[in-house]
Image (cartoon, coloured by chain):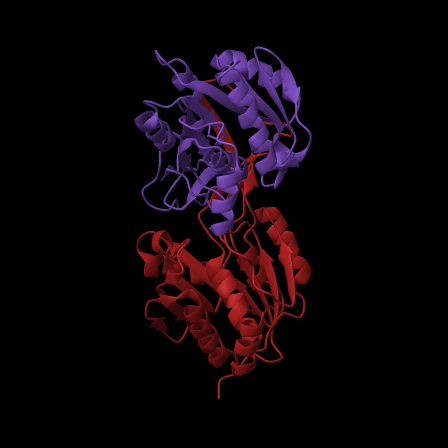
Chain colours: A red, B purple
Amino acid sequence: HLLEALTRFFTPKLLAGKNILITAGATMEMLDPVRGITNLSSGKMGFALAQAATRMGATVTLVYGHHQVTPPEVSQACFAGSAGEMYQTVMQHIANQDVFIAVAAVADYRPQQISEQKLKKSESTLTLALIKNKDILADIASLPNPPYCVGFAAESEQILEHARQKRLAKRIPMIVANHANSAMGSDHNTVTIIDDQAETPLQADEKINIAFEILCHLHARLDPH
Amino acid sequence: HLLEALTRFFTPKLLAGKNILITAGATMEMLDPVRGITNLSSGKMGFALAQAATRMGATVTLVYGHHQVTPPEVSQACFAGSAGEMYQTVMQHIANQDVFIAVAAVADYRPQQISEQKLKKSESTLTLALIKNKDILADIASLPNPPYCVGFAAESEQILEHARQKRLAKRIPMIVANHANSAMGSDHNTVTIIDDQAETPLQADEKINIAFEILCHLHARLDPH
């Protein structure tokens, strides 16, 4: 607590007065009371951004799913376990946000049915019917007066191409491209920031440092001089 | 470390000379490099049993999947992420084991295909084909000269009935029945030990204490006087 307070004190308050909503972690789409479809997101990148933004003076609302590390202290933190819950929670808190950073790895699909009791199956094969979830980031970006939206593209191949397409498809000003397999769960990351002005590759670094660089980049775009 | 060493020193060595293999945590059946089907098992109950058995003098081999807490120090620990990996790892270490305690929540099914690259889908619905995994506990129990096998039944309803059926279906001498929804992720548990002699309900308690009681019960069955 003391170290964090000191670090916070000595960090330049580049984001003072800004309200920032950040999603982090993994959603889990339950099949029954105990089983579900999820992903390897640890929450570390989103938590690093929430911590860095707080140190830089922003008022941070953190909406987080399943995670492997402790969430940082921020102005407000809400747990949202599934894609549907995360959609609802983000929508409830989006008014008055200046920035929305969508780092959470949100399931694209959910099971058509959630069994109330633990499934008992003996068949040698099983078919699971899935339906598409709503796209939180695209829906926030298409609001009448949207916050500045930052997406994350965690890809396993053709990373920059997929990220460019994702930025255009979701109509967001900025996306951060990274390699899913090596980034997820790690304390380190290698990213490229893509916006309408440039593609900016950052050097491989700890996630907390990557977070500061992304937020400095964001600050320059929010308040250009 | 010191506290654990002291606790270990002062714990009666009821399981001295016994080799015990314990599985713990959740398996995750990958759909692509980052997504998969898993469950809410935290690893806590299996880790508590591994820690308690070690304190009681056993030589413990721990095979663990995905988990939310730190694994305890045991003689040997192996990570096995999927049901298939856990099956292989258990089979590799089963020779010379006196006891096998299967606590891991192992997936019953896995996706028929694992995509090498992150799946890109735009359809509004999706169908997932799953095939049945091999049953680790049943296969160990049917070995020519099997170790004493203990299963866990984490059920959401008709807990005792399902556990009794599971014990008979897998042909194992002992099963521990508990309530999946309240046990998974919690530091506490409420269990009933079912064997061919009795059904023994234990008082709700911390998992480390439940672990000791299960192992004392097991000790009495292994070495009846």
The answer to whether residue A204 is above or below residue A135 is below
Against B117, residue B14 (above or below) is: above
- Indicate the quadrant where residue A175 lies: bottom left
x then y, percent, for residue A50: 54, 66
From the top left corner, tell me how far across and down residue B213 is, in percent: 59, 28
* Residue B214: quadrant of the picture: top right
Does residue B49 appear in the picture of this structure?
yes
Q: Is residue A120 visible?
A: no
Q: What residue do we see at 52% from left, 16% from top?
A: B221
Quarter of image, res B83: top left
Image quadrant holding the N terminus of chain A, namely bottom right
Q: Position of residue B200 (x, y in %)?
A: 64, 19
Q: How many marks?
A: 0
Q: Nearer the viewer, residue A145 or A148?
A: A148
Q: Residue at x 39, y 68 (%)?
A: A194
Residue nearest the observer in this picture, B146 or A175: B146
**B19 w.r.t. A71: above or below:** above
From the top left corner, tell me how far across and down residue B89 is, in percent: 34, 31
**Extreme residue in the bottom direction:** A225
Q: Nearer the viewer, residue A6 or A139?
A: A6
Left or right for B213, reference B144: right
In this view of the protein, which residue sits in the foreground, B152 or B30? B152
The answer to whether residue B19 is above or below residue B31 is above
